[in-house]
């Protein structure tokens, strides 16, 4: 499926609708350049899961956990990681067994460590506020 979003609010709405259909154990690999809308999508994803938390980018903390919805949401950002060994240091694989939804930004850096059933979502910048979202 391909969706054209013309604003951050529309990108969040796509994420919200996506989140409403997810089940425990879902893993999403969010692919796209910096500023392509991945975190805006996760904000909507959290809303779709019923989370009441304020969602922010985990670029500097690597992982944010949101547990106030119908399922826990684990938002991981691998942008700053340099080696696969760092995944073990943060307990990366444990999140896939935690009974929630994992949204992994920059998962392509370590694609072999993602579960086989991971759903890939690509984000592309299209103009000033436009985003193309594909899954």
Image: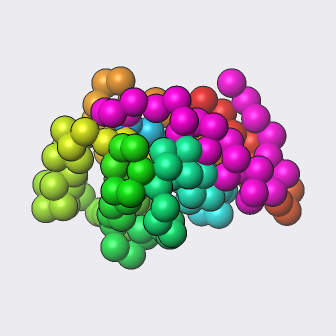
- Numbered marks: total: 0
Magenta-tinted stretch:
1-26
Res. 134 in view: yes
**Which one is in front, 20 or 5?**
20
Residue at 68% x, 42% y: name it.
14
Q: Is residue 113 left or right of residue 57?
A: left
Q: Is residue 90 magenta?
A: no
- Residue 23: x percent and y percent? 39, 30
The image shows residue 132, relative to residue 6, as above or below, that is above
Res. 106 in view: no
Type of colouring = rainbow
Residue at 68% x, 24% y: name it.
1
Q: Is residue 27 left or right of residue 89?
A: right
Task: Work out which quarter of the rendered image holds the C terminus and state it.
Answer: top right
Residue 110, picture quadrant: top left
- Residue 74: x percent and y percent? 35, 53
- Residue 111: x percent and y percent? 35, 38
Residue at 85% x, 62% y: name it.
128
Residue at 21% x, 43% y: name it.
98
Q: Does the magenta stretch include residue 12?
A: yes
The image shows residue 40, relative to residue 20, as above or below, that is below
- Residue 107: x percent and y percent? 40, 46
């Amino acid at each position: 499926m391909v969706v054209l979003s013309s604003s951050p609010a529309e990108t969040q709405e796509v994420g919200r609708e996506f989140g409403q259909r997810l089940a425990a154990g879902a893993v999403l690999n969010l692919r796209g350049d910096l500023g392509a809308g991945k975190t805006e999508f996760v904000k909507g994803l959290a809303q779709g899961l019923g989370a009441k938390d304020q969602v922010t980018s985990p670029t500097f903390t690597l992982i944010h956990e949101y547990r106030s919805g119908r399922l826990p949401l684990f938002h991981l950002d691998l942008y700053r990681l340099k080696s696969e060994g760092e995944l073990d240091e943060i307990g990366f694989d444990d999140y896939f067994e935690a009974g929630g939804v994992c949204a992994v930004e920059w998962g392509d850096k370590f694609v072999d460590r993602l579960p086989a059933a991971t759903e890939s979502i690509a984000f592309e910048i299209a103009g000033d506020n436009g985003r193309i979202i594909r899954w």
